[in-house]
Image: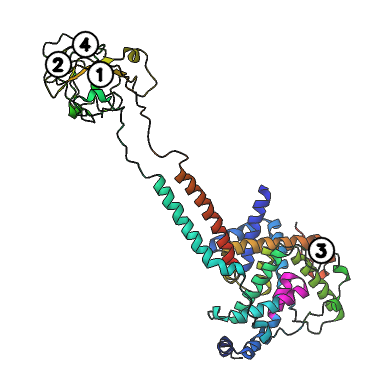
Amino acid sequence: MDEPRLIAAARSGDLDAFNELVLAYQDRVFNLAYRILGDPAAAEDAAQDAFISAYQHLSTFRGGSFLSWLLRTVANRCYDELRRQKRRPVVSWESFGEMDEEANPFLINGQPTPEETAQESELTDLLQAAIATLPPDQRVVLILSDIEGMDYAAVAATVGIPVGTVKSRLARARARLRDFLQTRGELLPSTYRPENEA
Amino acid sequence: MKKNRAQERLDEQLSAYIDGALSPRERARLEKQLAADPALRARLEALRQTVMLVRGLPPVRAPRNFLVTPSMVSRPARPIPWARRLAPALSFATAISAILCVVLLVANFLPERSEPQMAAPLPSAYSGGGTPVSTEAPIGIAPLSQITPQAFKAPSLNVTESATETPAPAIQAASGSDLETPSMIESAPTGLGEGGGAGGIGGDTGGGGYFPPGAERSTGEISVTSALIGEEALSSPQATPGGPIPTLLAPEVSIAGEEIPSTPVEGTPVPMGPSGPGLLSPTLVTAAGMAMLTALLTIITIRAWRAH
């Protein structure tokens, strides 16, 4: 895929060229939206709005990684949505035990054993529930850093905060997840149970 | 709270250590601590496993395609809200209002010219031969032509034109006057007794001076036989700045030989309060109203521009 050519064509109004970019990056964009919002329906809306906004504001793209620019757009949109929301995401601790692979068809996995599948599903749900307990500012930083793999500077540029703030928010988010998982360690698959403090 | 803050700082260091974001000095110090503290090592390990779990979350696939269609990006022309259409006119009105407010405030606080205080005009009988005597007198005292002889017993009173704010006839005292020294005028009205040629009050017998009672001056000059300084006024000080204001009585004034019966005319003490714009002058009130209008228009204009 010749990204610069597609971007140049999209800038001049070629919608088909832009949709090629959409197809290439929509999984990443939706994954980020889903991890942040925790709700598939809300994540769909956020992803669609992000792509529409990206097309309408292509003139603001200054070069570099187009994927990073897209993720920045959807992250900001999700962040704004979280601040507007007064409710917690759909994935709640109470419904954790009832969820299985069928309830989460979005999971992309290889060909594990049924036990591994179940364990992975349980872990995923537990982690998603844990992430949903984080405050929005910590949640976005954690996902951009540990799920999307951005470094401190990229996260700071995406969210619009200083690098020092990224460090502190990330540390607090990780510590809260650690404490959450330790209190519910008996529910984790044995392979993933963190060591208890001495 | 202190313990939590310390633990937060520690977690921040451990988190940065996991990411390799510590400086060499900080890393060395932390590793030294880890080597000596098993609990710290356990804390680090728990944090590291948590990070690994999060990083190991499997990616989710998009449930559908998010292709952008022309209908999504081409919005119909939305009518401009009326507020937005009025925004330019509101901006203009706000600017005009602000300018008027400033102009009114500046005009309100411009210094006013102080005008000399005018004493009561002389009675027509004192004008002598139809020639009007200057009715202007120093602030705070009656015209010299109104000074009566009864009580004013200054040995000499040099009151020249230059000594007073307003032209007054020169008063010359005869030499050898045996007049008693009068009580001092405690508060010299403005223009009289302040430097200049008014130094003759109470002492100066040279040059110009004061006519003894009954003395008459030659034609063209006004003779002031005596002047009365209101002793009552001196003994009962009034609440005026600088002390009591003397009450002067009209003198016997003879012009060109005429004797004019003295008619005591009390000089009207002139209040010497400050002049200037009052606190509630119409201009200030109007300026205040314009300021409020400007503020209101500003708010409306901002909202109109933000309307979409």
Instruction: Name, please, the residue furthest toward the right.
Output: A98
| Front residue (pair B203, A53) | B203
Q: Which quadrant would residue B230 be assigned to in this image? A: top left
Question: The disc labelled 2 sits on which kind of residue?
Answer: Glu
Chain designation of label 1:
B
Q: Nearer the viewer's eye, disc 4 or disc 1?
A: 1
Q: Is residue B21 visible?
A: no
Disc 4 is placed on an element classified as: loop
Density class for disc 2 (Cα within 10 Å; few <14, some 14-19, many ≥20) is: many
Question: The disc labelled 3 sits on which kind of residue?
Answer: Gly
Disc 2 is placed on an element classified as: loop
Q: Which mark is residue B147?
A: 1
Marks 2 and 4, how far apart in space? 21 Å
Instruction: Name, please, the residue furthest toward the front.
Output: B129
Residue A62, position as x, y percentages in the image: 53, 79
Density class for disc 1 (Cα within 10 Å; few <14, some 14-19, many ≥20) is: many
Q: Which residues are magenta?
A: A28-45
The residue at which mark 2 appears reads as: B216
